[in-house]
Image: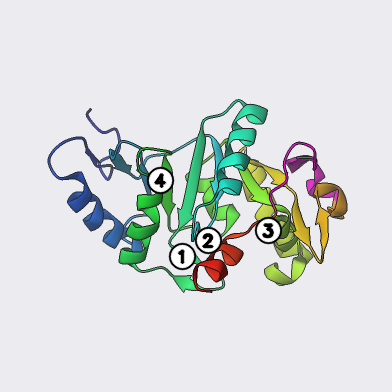
Amino acid sequence: MRPDNPRRRETTAGNPLQTLSAAVAELVKGELQTITVYSDGRWASEQPARGAILSGAFNPLHEGHIRLAAIAARRTGLPIFFELPVANADKGLISAEEVQRRLRQFRDKHPVLLSRAPLFSQKARLYPDSVFVIGYDTAIRIVAPRYYDGEAGMLAAFAKIREAGCRFLVGGRVQDDRFCTLANIDLPPAIRDLFDGLSEQEFRADLSSTELRAMAHS
């Protein structure tokens, strides 16, 4: 396949893992912005993606993630991608070695987007016309003005998301011993139309990656 973008690279033969390792290192250093890794090991850099995109740390990937992704694909009619950002607004960068470790969980199962985009306004630029699949806890954070230095900053960020043609699908989560969904969030009227929610009957998974890590070390 001849790439349309001169920065795009694709591998289908040889030693794809070794080549992908080099690309992941470039991503962590900021020399690339996104890499699409397919379940069969093929990959392409700087390739726009459109789909239902489930973003997370996936440390580890668990059944709740997989179920949510399947439900999102059915609800939206879009291809599903898991997105692993190597930069986190709160925790900093993930090492290239750790990215590779988490990426191996998806091999022969699901396509993954690796990105340098910790913010959804940045993800929207990389993946226009997509639906971002998020949990209740993430939805609470991204509509909180304190993360944007005020309401004006929050609305400006969502204006970029709207301009890119993106929106959100929110799955519920246990919070303070009760299961909460999008219906429990007081969304600002100006951005309410960008959100759709799954009911508890449609999706509920109480086990988190944090709990799984704790169980593994107990």
- Residue 6 showing in the rendered view: yes
Q: Residues within 10 Å of mark 3 (few under 14, many from 20)?
A: some
Of callouts 4 and 1, which one flags the residue occurring earlier in the amino acid sequence? 1
Q: Residue at x 41, y 68 (%)?
A: 94
Please, which residue is most extreme toward the left here? 14
Indicate the quadrant where residue 146 lies. bottom right
Q: Residue at x 61, y 48 (%)?
A: 64
Q: How is the image coloured?
A: rainbow
Of callouts 2 and 4, which one flags the residue occurring earlier in the amino acid sequence? 4
The residue that label 3 is drawn on is 138
The residue that label 1 is drawn on is 87
Q: Judging from the image, what secondary structure is the residue with disc 4 in?
A: helix
For residue 200: magenta?
A: yes
Task: Report the side of 104 relative to 190 (left or right).
Answer: left
Q: Residues within 10 Å of mark 2 (few under 14, many from 20)?
A: some
Q: Residue at x 54, y 55 (%)?
A: 56
The residue that label 4 is drawn on is 106
Q: Nearer the viewer, residue 199 or 187?
A: 199
- Whole-angstrom CA distance, mark 2 to mark 4, is 20 Å
- Whole-angstrom CA distance, mark 2 to mark 1, is 6 Å
Looking at the picture, how far across and down is residue 66, in whole percent? 55, 42
Q: Judging from the image, what secondary structure is the residue with disc 3 in?
A: helix
Span highlighted in magenta in the image:
189-205
Looking at the picture, how far across and down is residue 108, in whole percent? 35, 38
Above-or-below relation of 50 to 113: above
Task: Report the side of 22 relative to 194 (left or right).
Answer: left
The residue that label 2 is drawn on is 118
